[in-house]
Image (cartoon, rainbow, N blue to C red):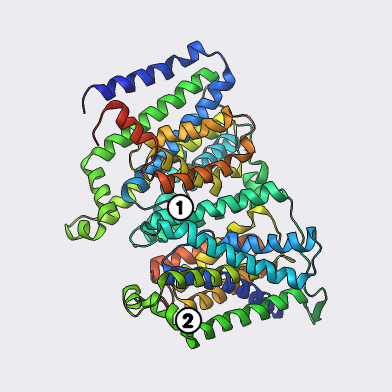
Amino acid sequence: MGSRPWIFVSLILAALAALPVIVKSEYLLGILSVCFIYGIWAASWDFMSGLTGRENFGHALFIGAGAYTSAFLNARFALNPWWGLPAGAAMAVLLALVIGFPTLRLRGPYFALAMLAAATIMQRLTLIFWQYSGGEEGIPGLDPLLNSKIGIYYLCLAALVLTTAALLLLARSHGGLLLRGIRGDEAACQAAGIDVTFYKIAALVVSAACAGMGGVLYAHYQEAVTPDVFSVALSISLIIMVYVGGIGTIYGPAVGAILLALLPELLRGLGQYRLWAYSVVLIFILFFAPGGLVAPLWRRAVGLAR
Amino acid sequence: MLNILVFGAVTSAVYAMLAVGFTLIFGVARVLNLAHGAFYGLGAYSCYLLTGRLGWPLLPAALVAVLFVAAFGVAMERFLVRPLRHSALAVLMITIAVALLFEQAMFLLFGSEARNVPAFINATWSYGELDVSGQRLLTLGAGIAIVALLWLFINRTRLGSAILALSQDREGALYMGIPADRIYAVVMAISAAIAAAAGVLTAPFLTVQPTMDLLPMIKAFSIVIVGGLGSIPGSILAALLLGYSETIVAYAISPAWTEIVSLVAVLLTLILRPAGLLGKRAAF
């Protein structure tokens, strides 16, 4: 890689870091913070599913697990919200292992279906066991991680940049190469003596940990959790964001998520039609731009011939 | 006891109707149709539109609703699934886009409140401790009849043989001159029609809401995984197994725990016998 992409990246990051100095609107900074969290979720989805080609239809399971774990510890046991970050990630990892072990050793659509079922059933359970989970209202009145909106903005931005950078490094490492190999030809990888099940589960664990931490950030940004964090609509929205960004590129989905999450906020009145618009966008992408939009444009902009 | 026997049978019949269509289209066309729940919901909503808004009598409304959903399934297969068949992931994504569009369209058209669809039979039937609505018994009867007819159709007719042949060996079937695309359309129509029939039949005693498509679909593919992907007898067996397990759990412990039954069943199946109860390489 030449120096040109780095200049671009630095410029964009500098602009985002300088934004709170220029824009004083706490409302806009709040929206952007949520968009960054979406970016973390989309990048973490892409790390497992984009690289290995095992599509995950219930990423919200990890997000919700992180959010609810932290909310529970904070609201019931008055634990400092910062402890929620490791606790939420640990719970997401636990769930990843429970679902991953039986399903990822198999070929076929079992993993996708089991994740979708698990996330949906968790959402139902939060409604059914309302005495503990607060039901439809969820758990309100959580402590924020930081007291100033600007602080939270920087926290979310830092979390997004660090996660994306870490996932990109992992994806370009030897292990990441193996994950791409699994996507290309699983049988050949197995024949070459690679423990493909281990690599797939490891990727899922990393992906779940990032998503769970994103969930914790989200819960404490909202200062509440509701069963919506487990919703299929969230899982599917993330996948659509990944498709728009360019599947398998990690940075593409992160940017795609920020743009798609920002869109309904910028176009007033679109909010109600958000999912409708997303599904139309998805159909368009599948037919006309299977490589996504963000990643190909970025490569052209920085002059990478890949 | 009698309650468990009858209500378990009704639940199983609904599950079987949903699962056979889902497994059929997977077994034959290798399409994992995540819009299957949308077919079920679309059946119920079409019936609501015709009876509730346009004032049609129930029987023609039900028939038109089922035919409409079958046509919708064929159109989806022709215009959205077929062009993307080269990539399994793209097919999966397009079906989920259709499911999402269904939910949003119903939400925008009819709002989020629950809608009522009239029942074919309003009487209830009591025997000892048992107290069951006629509509549930009709659903049970219709479910058995539909699954039996599907069974006869596949095993006793020429078209059925073509469907079987395609599911067993696509290339071989193509060499024998079986028009694969046309058969896929037929199978999609059958699969959509059965799901819509289940929607029309259960709508009077379940809720008709935009989000109604999700849970039945999750049940359908849980059953299909437990029974073996692509196996129709497996789906029927697993539908009975899950239908009765859920009913027993609801009576013995609490209805709250029924949702976990299917997830546990799926995970246990995948750990102990990934192919499913009756799953084989051949589809049926």
The local secondary structure at tag 2 comes to helix
Q: Position of residue A123 (x, y in %)?
A: 58, 50
Q: Quadrant of the N terminus of chain B?
A: bottom right
Local crowd size for mark 2, using a 10 Å CA cut-off: few (<14), some (14–19), many (≥20): some
Residue sitting at x 82%, y 73%: B122
Q: Residue at label 2?
A: B159
Residue found 45% across the figure and 21% down from its top: A154
Mark 1 — residue?
Answer: B93
Name the residue located 55 percent from the left edge and 24 percent from the top edge. Answer: A30
What's the chain of the residue with tag 2?
Answer: B
> Is B239 above or below relative to A122?
below
Label 1 SS: helix
Work out whether B120 lies above or below A42.
below
Residue B250: which quarter of the image? bottom right
Q: Amino acid at mark 1?
A: Met
What amino acid is at disc 2? Leu
Asked if both marks, 2 and 1, belong to the same chain, the answer given is yes
Quarter of image, res A192:
bottom left
Going by the image, does B151 lie left or right of B49?
left
